[in-house]
Image (cartoon, rainbow, N blue to C red):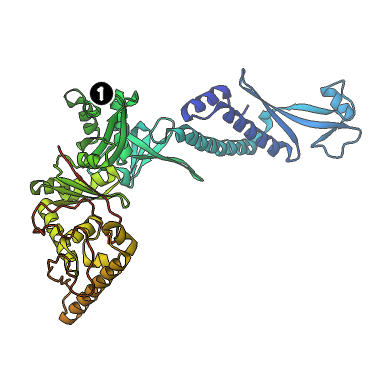
Amino acid sequence: MLITDIKRVIEQVSREKGINIEVLISTIKEAVESAAKKKLGTRADIEVHYEEKSGEVEVFQFKEVVLEVNDPDIELTLKDGQQYDPACEIGDSLGIKVDTSEFGRIAAQSAKQVIIQKMKEAERNAVYENFIHKKGEIINGIVQRIDRGNIIVNLGQAEAVLTSREQMPRESYRRGDRIRAYILDVLEEARGSQVILSRTHPEFVAKLFATEVPEIAEGIVTIRGTAREAGVRSKIAVSSTDSDVDPVGACVGMKGNRVQSIVQELRGEKVDIVPWNPDVAKFVCNALAPAEIARVIIDEDNRSMEVIVPDDFLSIAIGKNGQNVRLACRLTGWHLEVMSEDEYSSELKQGYDSLMSIPGVSLALAEKLFKGGFSSFKDVSLANPGDLISVTDLSESDVEALVLRAKKMLEADHTSQVEDGDSEVQENEPEARENEVGQGAPLHDDQASEIVQDSSEDTLSAEKKSSEVQGEVPGKDLELGE
């Protein structure tokens, strides 16, 4: 036959390339059939048989027994047919065994090309089928070569690529180095299937913990989320289904051996293990550790929070180049704005001053507006009357008057800026009033008799405040302990 010891070759290729034996046999049969037709003609009726036990390939050409031959490629006379089968009759189809050694060089070359083509297709399909179900897992390999910054990794049955963008900063490899990576994707392309690796993906850290921490594999400890800036710092949130198992302690390990093993794999990248909490405010506080948190103001509709920290902890909460708060945002899924207590007090005073500059607005009414998410006369001027009614309990007519006065102040403020040529917003000095409106009818406020306090004092606090845009739906203000 064309290939000696074909059975051994098929088994070896199947083992090395991960290609199914049946696919290889089909490829061989197709290649031999192509070679036979090169020799016997394209109209020849060819069948190729493979004997699995012996590894022998047999080729048969089928011809119909006729009285008179019109097409020798597919017909033969009764006399010729009886040489192969004495019992044959007119109309029978005889399978005549073909001597493959007579195929010649051209036919053999054709068979070789078919085998190469089919082998590539089979190998491409095998790579996809063998690795698509491993997507999202960690795999080990050996660096085979480096091509234009991309690392080609030998996985045994296939090659994978670790692109430059998926490599960690300041990490270098040489040929023959062992490498551990996360299977980011498996692509099925015309030129061949490709396994894409990553060492920068946040899930790489999560999978490393799943490998090192038995409690995660057992389902006792659950990874709730990960956030990462590869090569610098990661945060991972964990919880436990067993009250007797500390999820953070399980991940750290005895004397820190588990987390240290992961840090070594990440080439010294710092890893913060954060206890997850169903209370989102407490979860955010945990995510911003080691900073202490004084207060959290939540805007649930916009998934944003203002986080107030003691002045000494502002830089710690924000982190170097904003890294700590940035990772906390990704981990929790909330937009976080961190400010010091001094900054918050200043913002609080400015808000109250701006609201009380509206004629007829008392301290009590300003507090209601501020709690409702309106922190300036501009917010009030752009507000929906229904929202103002819901937070102030004023009548519809009083709310209309309030909005009208706020709009007049906004127009006057714009006019003043144009006349002065000043680009900075000039706010009117607040006038403390109780029930006096000044311009127009008074605004009725049942709580207007409350004592007016200096808004710069720390005793002024808002329980609800929107942190980003005017007219936002109010959130919650939580006083947090340790």
Front position in the image: 457 or 332: 457
| Most distant residue in the bottom direction | 419
Residue 473 placement (x, y as % from top left): 30, 55
Report the label total: 1
Q: Is residue 221 shown left or right of residue 80?
A: left
- Disc 1 marks a residue whose amino acid type is Val
Q: Is residue 386 above or below residue 320?
A: below
Q: Is residue 320 above or below residue 239?
A: below
Q: Residue at x 76, y 40 (%)?
A: 43
The crowd level at tag 1 (other Cα within 10 Å; few <14, some 14-19, many 20+) is: some
Q: Find disc 1 in the rendering and name its residue.
A: 245
| Most distant residue in the right direction | 67
Q: Which quarter of the picture shows residue 31?
A: top right
Q: Which quarter of the picture shows residue 261?
A: top left
Residue 246 placement (x, y as % from top left): 23, 26
Residue 248 shows in the view: yes
Front position in the image: 337 or 194: 337
Q: Is residue 480 shown left or right of residue 99?
A: left
Q: Residue at x 66, y 29 (%)?
A: 101
